[in-house]
């Protein structure tokens, strides 16, 4: 239960959620994450450090670049489950509007 609470607390921040969603497709360099989030380099770095301290992402350095990837498979499963539920709800709402 504590691990789930930690994950949900981490994902309640919009920037952290966008970062994690972006990392669902695989490892990314900070230079890719910053433009995707439309946040400053310092904001992204702070949020990545928070995610890393919570064990949600992990990093590796290659030369001057730092790459991040998801470190916790539960996060991937949670987001996929939530996205399925959201998509089902959207489809149901769309079907109801057609009637």
Image (cartoon, helix red, strand yellow):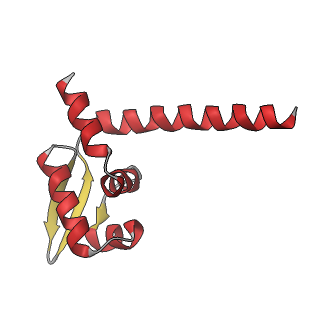
- Can you tell which quarter of the image residue 79 is in? top left
In this orientation, which residue lies closer to the viewer: 85 or 70? 85
Q: Position of residue 20 (x, y in %)?
A: 34, 51
Specify the farthest residue to the bottom. Answer: 64
Q: Residue at x 38, y 33 (%)?
A: 78
In this rendering, the answer to whether 71 lies above or below 45 is above
In this rendering, the answer to whether 78 lies above or below 36 is above
In this orientation, which residue lies closer to the viewer: 88 or 77? 88
Q: Residue at x 15, y 78 (%)?
A: 64
Q: Is residue 25 left or right of residue 96?
A: left
In this orientation, which residue lies closer to the viewer: 88 or 62? 88
In this rendering, the answer to whether 76 lies above or below 61 is above
Q: Position of residue 16 (x, y in %)?
A: 30, 54
Q: Quadrant of the N terminus?
A: top left
- Callout count: 0
Specify the farthest residue to the top. Answer: 1
Q: Is residue 97 left or right of residue 56?
A: right
Q: Residue at x 22, y 58 (%)?
A: 47
Q: Quadrant of the C terminus?
A: top right
In this orientation, which residue lies closer to the viewer: 49 or 74? 49
Q: Is residue 81 left or right of residue 20?
A: right
Q: Position of residue 22 (x, y in %)?
A: 39, 56
Q: Position of residue 87 (x, y in %)?
A: 60, 38
Specify the farthest residue to the right. Answer: 99
Q: Residue at x 23, y 64 (%)?
A: 67
């Amino acid at each position: 239960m504590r691990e789930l609470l930690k994950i949900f607390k981490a994902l309640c921040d919009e920037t952290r959620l966008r970062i994690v969603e972006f990392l669902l497709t695989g490892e990314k360099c900070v230079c890719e994450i910053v433009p995707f989030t439309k946040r400053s380099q310092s904001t992204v770095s702070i949020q990545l450090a928070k995610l890393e301290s919570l064990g949600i992402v992990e990093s590796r350095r290659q030369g001057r670049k730092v790459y991040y990837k998801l470190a916790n498979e539960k996060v991937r499963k949670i987001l996929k489950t939530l996205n399925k539920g959201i998509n089902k709800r959207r489809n149901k709402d769309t079907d109801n509007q057609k009637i």
